[in-house]
């Protein structure tokens, strides 16, 4: 094992006791920068490379994180505090450099230092690749959460996978999405530290044997497995100017030493290499599906790899502190499962406690049920994870046995609670019977956790009344709501410095760590002077976005920065209804062509997002947006009145630019389908006004900002449900002239003149009475509400007032609030102030 090679039990403390304190003055950064740039990276001081400048500067800043990191970890150890672990298959971190500067409080100093060296900090910042280890909201939420945990000084560690390839990059060719692999580690990653000494072995395959131990107890052995090594890479997660640095630990799959080729017979050489590659494939690539499961074996391998490595890590740490006594383990540890993706941690913890550490079933179950907490992120049936029993038996035989054991006891519990109700047993069972037996991961997660939460009020309510109804009846005390948030460091202070400094000038800077303070901006909504400054900042952001877009993408664009910036950026999915947005754009185009343009409000509609590579309809939606864009933008009758743009390769760093420039935030999902949404919060925080349905967190946004400052439209979740079975989109089209004209333009191939039939599937999907997303049902209400938007926008003062009020009332949507709720209701951790040496 590698352990021995890297760690000696007694470090030579005299060797490292005379480290000088890292300076935080401008000259310290200049000196260190030069040192790294010239001496470490071997670059010429007379030529400038923004990439290598970024590397050198990042190393200088990383040095400042190191001592704080060490002190924080020492504090946790000394205090023997209870700890939390956030287990997630995704951490969508985006860029690190500017966030590290912000949280260390050195942005201005470093900007000046670089300026003195003739380097524009912006240029360095924009060189950094996004760490795109996530699909969308769920992965970004994990990233915002760990920022808040560090800022609240909570002892929480993130555990995830170090994918070699993150979210694919998207380019658009002939209007279609083309995916390219995101080899984000190609130029190295200065923010991570490899920790070979904390590697663990993960088992796959083989079979289970049992025997009686010396005390006559039955013991199980998982033997004949093919093992893979999990090696951790740690990234420092600094809190906001508080001396805390937490850890994000990502696992990489490495072949074990058995794969050393000299141990194989010569004849097996090719097989041996293939086996090694197969082992290392586990962390090769992020699955690019958001809100859908795909049932692939490699995905299950990833999930088990994450769960097993992380749990072994926590148990090894426990043993190093307390030995093999687990009686207080549940008092000191808590795991939050980010959806069911890591929920195989439940049987894995049972296995480790019983098979490796000798606990009885009851002891192990007690610990498991007291340490695991589960967050659900979706109600969509296509996203609910199920794994075939057959596959699990082959890949994880011991785990499958334990799941059967959990289910047998669970079924007995249900039978006690509801005697004679066979139907309940069938509905609640962790094992779904049928042609193929399947493991329902959500049921496993609920049965094995002490807490189950949804991510917005409506979502939690629907979980309790719908999807998990029986579970809620059985264990009402387990259920709770935790409305999502976003970190105000990245999503306001960092991405919008102009707005941030205006806010700070008015109300001081405490809003950065207590976002409810933004409420103090409200009175300024009535101040003409303040409104002008607010508007100027928004206008400048819009102009910056225009430049960014021109820079990055196609050159010639009539992109009018005076126009209403109408923005929908998120994964492309039918339930998010980008199609509804496009129908409205076509309607506006039709109005222009008809000359119905009295009091016209120029509008620029921006749509961005990636489609899962296998999601054919979603890819068609991208093609439609691009084709409509092409026709509209090229039409001289349209001119500056209307622009439709597709924003390619939407990602975290793009949102940091986009959200500052938005006037209108499109949150138009079919009611009941978007569990929460978080883009809605970023846009609100930066002064965009929402046009939205009563779905997910939109409901709470409207509650906070008031109906006057929110554009509500569409059917409610209840109305959607009531409408099913007699939804008649053709009748609706028949009765609505505007809609009829829009559908006619589509059916007449106005946007696909030389590509006959390519949109037939899309058109049919919305005309179908079984359309689950009921796009047509909400068209009229949406179009009418967009008219109200225009009326409001025409009155610049009125609009600016609404913009200010949206920002001022976004305080609830800080992940600091969310994490405080997780902590007081679920984790019960004590904040750990870090004393500077
Ligand atoms: C919700 C979104 C919510 C976000 O989580 C989502 N759930 C998945 N992806 C999301 C954070 O709580 O704001 O409304 O849709 O963005 C999600 C998912 C998945 C399976 C189920 C749900 C994401 C990636 C891969 C698989």
Image (cartoon, rainbow, N blue to C red):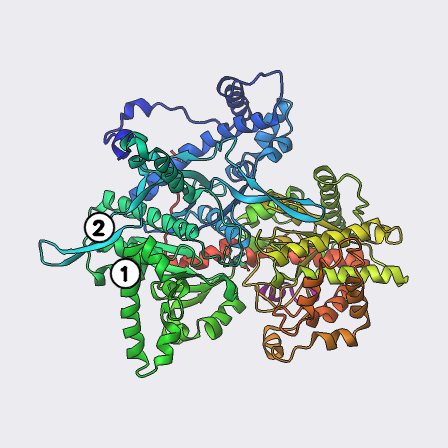
User: Between marks 2 and 1, how big is the CA–CA gap?
Assistant: 16 Å
In the image, 169 versus 469, the foreground residue is 169
Quarter-of-image position of residue 729 = bottom right
Q: In the current view of this chain or complex, which residue is farthest to the bottom? A: 420
Q: Is mark 1 within 8 Å of ligand 1?
A: no
Task: Check disc 2 and report its element: helix, strand or loop.
Answer: helix
Q: Is residue 121 above or below residue 605?
A: above
In the image, 560 versus 413, the foreground residue is 413
Magenta stretch, residue numbers = 699-709
* Overall secondary structure of the magenta section: helix
In the image, 723 versus 702, the foreground residue is 723
Q: Position of residue 107 (x, y in %)?
A: 57, 35
Number of numbered discs overlaid on the protein picture: 2
Res. 350 mark = none
Q: Say few, some or many: other residues with alpha carbon within 10 Å of mark 1 (under 14 / 14 to 19 / 20 or more).
A: some
Q: Which residue is mark 2?
A: 356
Q: Which residue is mark 1?
A: 401
Task: Check disc 1 and report its element: helix, strand or loop.
Answer: helix
- Please report the residue visible at 55 percent of the width from the left and 59 percent of the height from the top: 812
- Tag 2 and tag 1, C-beta contact below 8 Å: no
Look at the image and say whether residue 594 sits in the magenta stretch. no
Look at the image and say whether residue 700 sits in the magenta stretch. yes
Q: Position of residue 420 (x, y in %)?
A: 31, 84
Instruction: Tell me: 642 left or right of 802.
Output: right
Quadrant of the rendering where the C terminus is positioned: top left
Q: Position of residue 502 (x, y in %)?
A: 67, 45
Q: Is mark 2 within 8 Å of ligand 1?
A: no
């Amino acid at each position: 094992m590698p352990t021995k090679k890297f760690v000696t039990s007694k470090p030579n403390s005299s060797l490292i006791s005379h480290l000088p304190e890292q300076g935080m003055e401008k000259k310290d950064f200049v000196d260190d920068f030069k040192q790294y740039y010239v001496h470490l990276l071997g670059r010429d001081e007379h030529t400038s490379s923004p990439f290598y400048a970024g590397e050198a500067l990042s190393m200088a800043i990383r040095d400042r994180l190191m001592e704080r990191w060490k002190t924080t970890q020492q504090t946790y150890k000394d205090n023997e505090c209870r700890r939390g672990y956030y287990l997630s298959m995704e951490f969508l971190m985006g860029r690190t450099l500017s966030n590290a500067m912000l949280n260390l409080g050195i942005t201005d100093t470093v900007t000046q230092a670089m300026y003195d060296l003739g380097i524009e900090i912006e240029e360095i910042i924009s060189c950094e690749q996004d760490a795109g280890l996530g699909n969308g909201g769920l992965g970004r939420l994990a990233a915002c959460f760990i920022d808040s945990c560090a800022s609240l000084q909570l002892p929480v560690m993130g555990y995830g996978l170090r994918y070699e390839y993150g979210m694919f990059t998207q380019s658009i060719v002939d209007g279609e999405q083309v995916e390219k692999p995101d080899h984000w580690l190609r130029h190295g990653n200065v923010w991570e530290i490899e920790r070979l000494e904390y590697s663990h072995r993960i088992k796959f395959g083989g079979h289970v044997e049992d025997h009686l131990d010396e005390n006559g107890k039955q013991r199980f052995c998982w033997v004949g497995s093919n093992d893979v090594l999990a090696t951790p890479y740690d990234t420092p997660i600094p809190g906001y100017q508080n001396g805390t640095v937490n850890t994000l630990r990502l696992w990489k799959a490495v072949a074990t030493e058995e794969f050393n080729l000299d141990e194989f017979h010569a004849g097996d050489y090719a097989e041996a290499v293939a086996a090694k590659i197969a082992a290392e494939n586990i962390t090769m690539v992020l699955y690019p599906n958001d809100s859908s499961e795909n049932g692939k074996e490699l995905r299950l391998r990833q999930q088990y790899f994450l769960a097993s490595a992380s749990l072994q890590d926590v148990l090894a740490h426990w043993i190093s502190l307390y030995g093999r006594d687990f009686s207080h383990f549940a008092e000191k540890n808590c795991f939050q499962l980010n959806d069911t993706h890591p929920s195989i941690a439940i049987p894995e913890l049972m296995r480790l406690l019983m098979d490796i550490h000798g606990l009885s079933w009851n002891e192990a179950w007690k610990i498991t049920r007291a340490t695991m907490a589960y967050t659900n992120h979706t109600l969509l049936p296509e996203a609910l994870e199920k794994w075939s029993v057959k596959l699990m038996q082959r890949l994880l035989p011991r785990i499958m046995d334990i799941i059967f054991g959990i289910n047998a006891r669970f079924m007995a519990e249900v039978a006690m609670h509801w005697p004679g109700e066979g139907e309940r047993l069938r509905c609640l069972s962790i094992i779904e019977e049928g042609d193929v037996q399947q493991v329902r991961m959500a049921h496993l997660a609920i049965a094995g956790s002490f807490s189950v939460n949804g991510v917005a009020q409506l979502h939690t309510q629907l979980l309790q009344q719908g999807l998990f109804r029986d579970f809620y009846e059985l264990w009402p005390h387990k259920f709770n709501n935790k409305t999502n948030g976003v970190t105000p460091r990245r999503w306001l202070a960092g991405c919008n410095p102009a707005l941030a400094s205006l806010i700070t000038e008015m109300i001081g800077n405490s809003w950065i760590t207590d976002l409810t303070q933004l409420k103090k901006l409200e009175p300024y909504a009535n101040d003409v002077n303040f409104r002008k400054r607010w508007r100027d900042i928004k206008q400048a952001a819009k102009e910056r976005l225009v430049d960014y877009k021109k820079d990055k993408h196609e050159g010639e664009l009539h992109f009018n920065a005076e126009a209403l910036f109408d923005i929908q950026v998120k994964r492309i999915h039918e339930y998010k209804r980008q199609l509804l947005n496009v129908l409205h754009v076509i309607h506006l185009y039709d109005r222009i062509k008809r000359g119905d343009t009295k009091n016209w409000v120029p509008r620029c509609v921006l749509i961005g997002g990636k489609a899962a590579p296998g999601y054919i309809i979603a890819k068609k939606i991208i093609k439609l947006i691009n084709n409509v864009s092409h026709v509209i933008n090229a039409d001289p009758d349209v001119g500056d009145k209307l622009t439709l743009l597709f924003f390619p390769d939407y990602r975290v760093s793009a949102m940091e630019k986009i959200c500052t420039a938005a006037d209108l935030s499109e949150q138009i999902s079919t009611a009941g389908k978007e569990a929460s949404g978080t883009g809605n919060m970023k846009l609100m925080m930066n002064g965009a006004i929402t046009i939205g349905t009563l779905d997910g967190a939109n409901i709470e946004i409207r509650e906070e900002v008031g109906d006057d400052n929110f554009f509500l439209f569409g059917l409610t979740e209840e109305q959607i449900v009531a409408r099913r079975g007699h939804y008649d989109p053709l009748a609706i089209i028949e009765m609505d002239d505007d809609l009829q004209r829009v559908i006619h333009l589509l059916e007449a191939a106005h946007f696909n003149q030389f590509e006959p039939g390519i949109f037939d599937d899309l058109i049919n999907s919305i005309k179908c009475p079984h359309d689950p997303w009921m796009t047509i049902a909400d068209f009229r209400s949406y179009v009418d509400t967009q008219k109200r938007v225009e009326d409001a926008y025409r009155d610049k003062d009125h609009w600016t007032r609404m913009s200010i009020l949206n920002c001022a009332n976004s305080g609830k949507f800080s992940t600091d609030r969310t994490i405080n709720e997780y902590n007081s209701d679920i984790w019960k951790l004590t904040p750990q102030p870090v004393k500077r040496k």
